Amino acid sequence: MFRKTLLPALGLLAALSFAAPLQAVPVTDRHAAAVALVDSLHPLTGTVALPSAQATLKLTDVYSFLPAKDAQRVVTQLWGNPPDDTVLGMILPGSDPHSLLNGHRWAVVVTFVDEGHVSDGDAAKVDYDDMLKDLKQATKDSNDERLKDGYPAIELMGWAEPPHYDAASHKLYWARDLKFTRADGADAGHTLNYAIRVLGRKGYLSLNAVAPIGALSQVRADMPQVVALAEFDPGERYADYQPGRDKLAAYGIAALVAGGIAAKAGLFAKLGVILLALKKFIVLGVAAIGGAISRLFKRKQA
């Protein structure tokens, strides 16, 4: 049943959500442009309000936050993704944004999805091993089209961190290990995509950590603290949901892990709605570009 309802949209998600490859410009020019961009960023520290999400980040002294405009510039100009005005900001380790140029560090892109209150009634019933099989097949099925369009093929290697849901805090997190291969068979790198979802009254905060797969141990060590940074404001928390008054999302925990908004369309008759919704998940493409950026700076430093 899971395959019949989700597989078509997952293939579409995998095909559309990764951004364009880096342009073929000299490494030295890309390096200079990247450094200039990072030099112009203005990270915030302390308590950061996210008014459009009615949420707050309470940063400790080991984290900083790039506000929306700066984060969107990183996503588009540094990582090569299309413009995405749903990005609310970006959490960084430390206070120096030059960590974005370090091939062994992570960044967390923050967005808010206001599709309604997500029921966690299915949280204890999900078979994530079965889901993984479908996700792998969906990713594989998208590769012919990806290669045709000039993108590398993707192989979902498995869960780098199996999905976990904390029913007390209403926070969900998981990580995927992704491998990229060019059309000529050349290895295009391994990348980690670590996802956090903080459920609230009217929607959820989406925190997507981007890092090379070699940074998994560091990400695993840091993400529990990052999960704790984000909370909805009083009156907007999960327990504040009012049945009959507040909108209820058309999907649950399983769909969040598998593809979230794309899954809510059921049999996917309204393709245009799916395409629009997928814009909110474009940050998945950051993983591929992040890996390319890290390799760029490794070559520069060699």
Image (cartoon, rainbow, N blue to C red):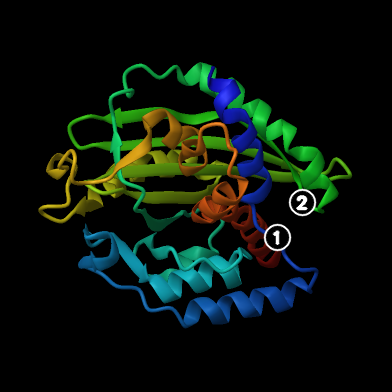
Q: With 200 as the anchor, is 261 left or right in this view?
A: right
Q: Residues within 10 Å of mark 1 (few under 14, many from 20)?
A: some
- Residue in the foreground of this view, choosing between 275 and 151: 275
Which residue is located at x 79 percent, y 74 percent? Answer: 26
Q: Is residue 182 visible?
A: no
Q: Measuring 29% from the left and 65% from the top, which residue is drawn there? A: 52
Where the N terminus falls, by quadrant? top right
Left or right, 44 with reference to 193: left
| Between 163 and 83, the one nearer to me in the picture | 83
- Residue 278's mark? none
Assess disc 2: are there few (<14), some (14-19) or many (≥20) residues with their C-alpha within 10 Å of its C-alpha. many
Lateral position of residue 45 relative to residue 80, left or right: left
Who's the residue at 44% across and 63% down the image?
A: 86
The quarter of the picture where residue 157 lies is top right
Q: Could you tell me if the residues under marks 2 and 1 are in contact, i.e. CB atoms within 8 Å?
A: yes
What type is the residue that disc 2 sits on?
A: Tyr
Look at 67% across and 38% down and name the residue there: 179
Residue holding disc 2: 151
